[in-house]
Image: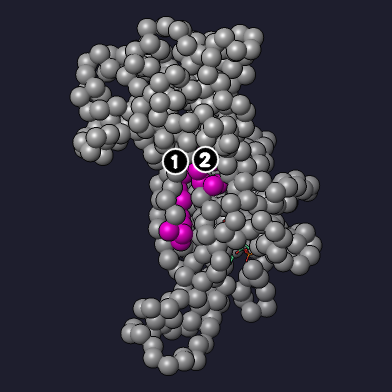
């Protein structure tokens, strides 16, 4: 998405630097537009180093920059939006590049007010905001917290994560509106005793990115996560779990009625048969057993028409193994990542995947941010949903031991 990041002159402008970085990391093309007051708080050079395009400051440089910026933007976000900026925008003034761009754009606009409590509560500010909301402007409300000068109260700009989520929601496609999506994330932890666990290297970033991207596209999302990560989307219902058994119970409870189920979690394949009640001293002899195959269980219980997505973390012959897993697991899409490749899979901010489809065909997504990988996956999911996915429920075949291969 092409994002114009307007920065007006308040102390919260320092947080706009983080907003800029996160927007770029999420794959957006960011052009910062700084007001004269903004540069009293933050340097142009910082934005120049982080953004995708040169910093813009003046109406008088280049040819009609405000209409060019306004027309090409997918979203304009103002963070921070001071009381003065809100007043000028609400009044329809266009006396600098930022306000002129705000009037010249037809793209969604997101404003992130930041000011002292007395100013925030002033009827003039609230009237201006109400006018902007009535015109369709999205407001990311400020929080209560520490303000400039050590005061504490309402008016502190929202955190960058919430702002980035609001931008994605405002500018991205809303093609999952009315859909319910359930996603799993993170590496489960299987207890040896109250102190030690068996786990794996999953950070949960890929699953969280899928959940956040689905929420931004309008879905109502339940995220079942074993990762200690925060969630950058207020609309996501988060269910925290630890073990494979917890995750199975949460996924089985959440999946009925969902349009889409995505198993991005790295579920531990085995666990201690018994875990000790108290800390084990010395070296224990562990007897391991297989964990439940959650994905197979979800496929067995699948609602008619429900789209089920699995992931496969592979290190050798990823595509061949992935194709076998697609078949065995009975999923609609299988996202294969070669976790031995640089920048791919566990804990990285990036991933590279091939999305295999049960209907045939493969889409390759080269090394991208996990959010971009999530978007590419959701494009495929939306494709399946819109071609009225009506295949009868399929079941995953069991192996000779009665267990399903993972
Ligand atoms: O979390 P990150 O650090 O961002 O890393 C992302 C990731 C590498 C974890 C992710 O991209 C990924 O590949 N997730 C699946 C990892 C995995 O467990 O792969 P698998 O091939 O072992 O399992 C295949 C599928 O079966 C997966 O959808 C898995 O969730 C599911 N499974 C596996 C075992 C089990 N007992 N129950 C399951 O449901």
Q: In the drawing, does residue 134 fall left or right of residue 52?
A: left
| Residue 211 within the segment the image draws in magenta | yes
Boundaries of the magenta span: 209-228
Q: Which residue is mark 1?
A: 161
Residue at 57% x, 15% y: name it: 70
Mark 2 or mark 1: whose residue is earlier in sequence: 2
At x 52% / y 35%, what residue is drawn? 46
Question: Residue 390 at what x, y percent from top left?
Answer: 65, 42
Q: CA distance from mark 2 to mark 1?
A: 8 Å
Q: Quadrant of the N terminus?
A: top right
Give the numbered dot on residue 205: none
Q: Nearer the viewer, residue 4 or 356?
A: 4
Please state if 128 lies on the left or on the right of 324 as rendered.
Answer: left
SS of the residue under disc 1: helix
Q: Residue at x 46, y 51 (%)?
A: 223
Q: Few, some or many C-alpha atoms within 10 Å of disc 2 (few <14, some 14-19, many ≥20)?
A: some
The picture places residue 303, in percent across and down from the top left corner, at 55, 49
**Foreground of the two, 3 or 195:** 3
Q: Is residue 156 left or right of residue 291?
A: left
Residue labelled with disc 2: 22
Q: Residues within 10 Å of mark 1 (few under 14, many from 20)?
A: some
């Amino acid at each position: 998405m092409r994002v114009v990041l307007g920065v007006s002159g308040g102390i919260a402008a320092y947080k706009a630097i983080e907003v800029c970085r996160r927007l770029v990391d999420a794959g957006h093309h960011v052009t910062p537009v700084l007001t004269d007051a903004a540069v009293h708080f933050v340097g142009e050079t910082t934005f120049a180093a982080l953004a995708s395009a040169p910093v813009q400051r003046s109406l008088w440089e280049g040819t009609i920059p405000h209409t060019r910026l306004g027309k090409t933007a997918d979203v304009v976000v103002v963070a921070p939006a001071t009381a003065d900026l809100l007043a000028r925008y609400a009044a329809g003034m266009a006396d600098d590049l930022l306000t002129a761009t705000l009037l010249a754009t037809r793209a969604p606009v997101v404003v992130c007010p930041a000011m002292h409590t007395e100013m925030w509560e002033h009827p003039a500010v609230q009237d201006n905001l109400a006018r902007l909301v009535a015109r369709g402007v999205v407001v990311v409300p400020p929080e209560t917290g520490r303000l400039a000068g050590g005061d504490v109260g309402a008016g502190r700009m929202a955190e960058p994560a919430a702002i980035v989520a609001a931008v994605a929601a405002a500018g991205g496609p809303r093609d999952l509106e009315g859909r319910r999506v359930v996603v799993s994330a993170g590496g489960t932890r299987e207890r040896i005793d109250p102190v030690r666990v068996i786990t794996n290297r999953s950070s949960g970033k890929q699953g969280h990115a899928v959940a956040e991207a689905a929420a931004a596209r309008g879905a109502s999302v339940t995220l079942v996560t074993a990762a200690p990560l925060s969630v950058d989307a207020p609309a996501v219902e988060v269910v925290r779990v630890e073990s494979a058994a917890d995750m199975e119970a949460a996924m089985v409870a959440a999946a009925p009625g969902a349009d889409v189920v995505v198993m991005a979690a790295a579920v531990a394949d085995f666990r201690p048969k018994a875990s000790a009640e108290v800390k084990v001293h010395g070296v224990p002899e562990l007897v391991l057993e297989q964990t439940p195959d959650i994905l197979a269980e979800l496929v067995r219980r699948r609602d008619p028409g429900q789209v089920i997505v699995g992931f496969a973390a592979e290190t050798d012959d990823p595509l061949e193994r992935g194709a076998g897993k697609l078949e065995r697991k009975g999923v609609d899409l299988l996202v294969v990542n070669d976790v031995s490749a640089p920048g791919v899979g566990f804990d990285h901010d990036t991933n590279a995947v091939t999305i295999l489809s049960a209907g045939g065909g493969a889409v390759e997504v080269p090394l991208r941010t996990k959010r971009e990988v999530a978007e590419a996956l959701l494009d495929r999911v939306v494709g399946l949903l819109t071609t009225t996915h009506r295949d009868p429920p399929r079941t995953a075949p069991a192996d000779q031991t009665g267990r399903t291969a993972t």
